Amino acid sequence: MSARARIQGARHWRTGEAIDVVIVRGVIEAVSPAGALPEQPDEARFDAEGAVLAPGLVDLHVHLREPGQTAKETIASGTRAAAAGGFTDVACMPNTNPVLDEPARIEWVRNRAREAGHCRVHPIAAVTLGQQGEQLAPLLALREAGAVAFSEDGRPIMSAEVMRRALEYALPTGCPIVCHEEDLTLRGRGHMNEGVVSARLGLRGIPPAAEVIMVRRDVELAALTGGRVHLAHLSCAGSFEGLRDARRRGLAVTGETCPHYWMLTDEAVEGYDTLAKMNPPLRDERDRQATIAAIVDGTIDCFATDHAPHTADEKAQPFDQAPFGIVGLETALALTITGLVRPGHLSLERALELWTDAPRRVFGLPRVAVEPGSPADLVLFDPAAEWVIEPARFHTRGRNTPFAGRTVAGRVIATWLAGHTTHVDPERERRLLGKRSTAGVN
Ligand SMILES: [Zn+2]
């Protein structure tokens, strides 16, 4: 992209007005009514064709798997997938090999991400050394190296005493502790939600209480310490009640949920489908409805994907041996529009807030807006365009999604990071090429 670029004829995500956006050296210089500003000869132009232009999406919960698990994903492939999904910022989890529990490893991840150039990556550091749940990691030094939060994601901090100390030590960093809420004694060897479906399939279940008990404990520890708690991937009614309680008491507790919890129930596991195996597990219809209610009434602070790529071989194992997790970066926006906006639960503007401004607030990331002076971190998408989810076309190395073959609405057309194009829809490219060659014949 040249130093000066123009996105012309876009629809502003908040006002709905037709606009042109002029970008100079990675920063938005002007936002004007479409066609109002004279074009300049040296600028690169992108015809938005009336699609919606919004700040780049932000995902606070992804597993980039590097270092150590590059068969599942790399920083380059995961961030390329993020760009394809309309994301300009992701926060990556520290349960890599080795674990991100040293400042040098945080810096390594940030450097790798910068080299790849697809997306801003904000590392989340481990709470304890090696994620062993015992000795605290050097939280202040990790913060100074660029960590935006601390988490043991993939597992809970089972010791309430360690969790209390972690919250106290994290206080001067201003960063939240991101909690994967699960009581391991209650989970036992469960592999899916405990209920009628698990009984029918003869699979050991994980009751919602395994999550709710830990949510309640950590709300009390936030009250005790004044520390910041961010509740990851909430999946059930009891957890939302816990978050509401924290809010009523004015505690520094926030929470996220993921598209699969509003799209699916444990019925998706029928046929022992390991592509519907994740942790927390898909719950029943009552919990799915409770998830939507918690989004609509503002209990949920933001969305996240819990993007968790695995290899096909790993997911081909019997249900009780396959790993937990699904990919999510390239389907998140479409599942939000299809599952929440189209049925009328949320306006498009509110849905986008939960992927942009809201997660930025939770992790204290700088504000991005479609206005002059803001970094040109942008996504252009067509909310009405329907497409079929085909995992073979994903940029992530993971193909593990339960949504293959589904028709969804909402297609990302282009993504820009500091004015650089990080993704353009290949369908658009093909269509424009077709147009051009027709023009040539005439
Ligand atoms: Zn988790």
Image (spheres, rainbow, N blue to C red):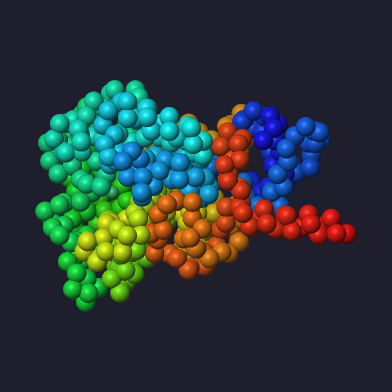
Which residue is located at x 35 percent, y 55 percent? 311
Placement of the C terminus among the 4 image quadrants? bottom right
Q: Please name whichever residue, 322 or 62, is drawn nearer the observer in this view of the structure.
A: 322
Quarter of image, res 167: top left
Could one spot residue 93 in this view of the protein?
Answer: no
Q: Please name whichever residue, 362 or 7, is drawn nearer the observer in this view of the structure.
A: 7
Q: Please name whichever residue, 289 or 416, is drawn nearer the observer in this view of the structure.
A: 416
Placement of the N terminus among the 4 image quadrants? top right
Task: Give the left or right position of residue 271, taking residue 24 as reference.
Answer: left
Which residue is located at x 61 percent, y 35 percent? 419
Looking at the image, residue 105 lies above or below residue 384:
above
Quarter of image, res 410: bottom right
Looking at the image, residue 337 lies above or below residue 195:
above
**Residue 370 in the image, given as x and y percentages of width and height:** 61, 38
**Residue 382 in the image, given as x and y percentages of width and height:** 61, 56
Could one spot residue 273 in this view of the protein?
Answer: yes
Q: How many marks?
A: 0
| Residue at the far right in the pictured view | 442
**Residue 317 in the image, given as x and y percentages of width and height:** 27, 64
**Residue 131 in the image, given as x and y percentages of width and height:** 20, 38
Which residue is located at x 26 percent, y 53 percent? 239
Q: Please name whichever residue, 1 or 37, is drawn nearer the observer in this view of the structure.
A: 1
Which residue is located at x 48 percent, y 68 percent? 406
Task: Give the left or right position of residue 193, taking residue 62 as reference.
Answer: left
Task: Give the left or right position of residue 82, taking residue 286 as reference.
Answer: right
